[in-house]
Image (cartoon, helix red, strand yellow):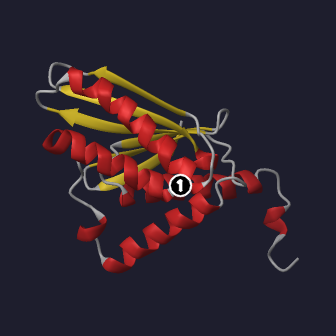
């Protein structure tokens, strides 16, 4: 009746959740060009943010950075909400001149300020070695950038209630962001 029967159909809720999850990952990648890819694990409720470092990477710089990032995020959350969130940072070499840093966080406690802090610390610490997409919010059409930023804020605000059902991966492909179920 009145066109809302689709809400009762099996899987309709999952489709709505999938669309929200796709939009969440896409908005995150659009708003943070420093993040090369993002993965969502529905079983754990975790998000893995991947950063690419290229060039002559000083491994002696990575270990102190991971401790500094952990302390910075602990301090951020102590000031914001008094919680100590789950955080895992791992790195892997891909060839001689590429390093992937993986930052794993639970979505339920993830905040926009935290994402900004992570990306700013990555840029400050690794500078030109950090691969950053050319399509930043500053380079995008103003309306599109505003909508993506607002959507990301809204979804992060609802993250505690939201639980996406599908395992998803968002990646940069040329000048596009692609999100798919895994």
Categorize mark 1 by other alpha carbons within 10 Å: few (<14), some (14-19), many (20+).
some
The N terminus, quarter of image: bottom right
* Res. 42 image quadrant: top right
Q: Could you say which quadrant of the image residue 67 lies in? A: top left
Q: Secondary structure at mark 1?
A: loop
Q: Which residue is mark 1?
A: 111
Give the side of residue 49 with respect to residue 142, left or right: right
User: Residue at the location (38% across, 60% down)?
Assistant: 31
- Residue 153 to residue 126: above or below: below
Q: Position of residue 74 (x, y in %)?
A: 51, 41
At horizontal 58% and vertical 35% (from top left) the residue drawn is 86
Measuring from the top left, give residue 89's x and y in whole percent. Answer: 43, 29
Q: Is residue 130 visible?
A: no
Q: Which residue does the image show at 73% across and 55% down from the upper left?
A: 161
Q: How many marks?
A: 1
Left or right: 158 with respect to 63? right
Residue, far left: 56
Residue 163 in percent (x, y) is at 69, 48
Can you name the residue that lies furthest to the right here? 1
Q: Is residue 72 above or below residue 88?
A: below
Q: Mark yes or no: residue 117 visible.
A: yes
Q: Could you tell me residue 98's position as x and y percent? A: 20, 27
Image quadrant where one finds the C terminus: top right
| Residue 37 falls left or right of residue 127 | right
Q: Is residue 162 left or right of residue 123?
A: right
What is the quadrant of residue 80 in the picture? bottom right
Q: Residue at x 50, y 62 (%)?
A: 152
Q: In terms of depth relative to the viewer, which is nearer, 148 or 75?
A: 75
């Amino acid at each position: 009746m009145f066109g809302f029967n689709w809400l009762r159909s099996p899987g309709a809720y999952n489709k709505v959740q999938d669309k929200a999850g796709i939009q969440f990952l896409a908005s995150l990648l659009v708003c943070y060009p420093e993040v090369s890819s993002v993965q969502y694990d529905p079983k754990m409720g975790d998000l893995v943010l991947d950063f690419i470092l290229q060039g002559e990477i000083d491994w002696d710089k990575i270990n102190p950075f991971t401790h500094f990032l952990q302390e910075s995020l602990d301090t951020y959350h102590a000031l914001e909400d008094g919680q100590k969130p789950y955080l895992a940072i791992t790195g892997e070499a891909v060839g001689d001149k590429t390093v992937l840093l993986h930052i794993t966080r639970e979505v339920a406690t993830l905040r926009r300020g935290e994402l900004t802090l992570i990306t700013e610390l990555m840029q400050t610490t690794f500078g030109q070695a950090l691969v950053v997409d050319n399509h930043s919010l500053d380079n995008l059409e103003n309306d599109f950038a505003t909508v993506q930023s607002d959507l990301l804020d809204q979804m992060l605000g609802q993250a505690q209630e939201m639980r996406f059902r599908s395992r998803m991966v968002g990646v940069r492909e040329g000048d596009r962001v692609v999100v798919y179920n895994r």
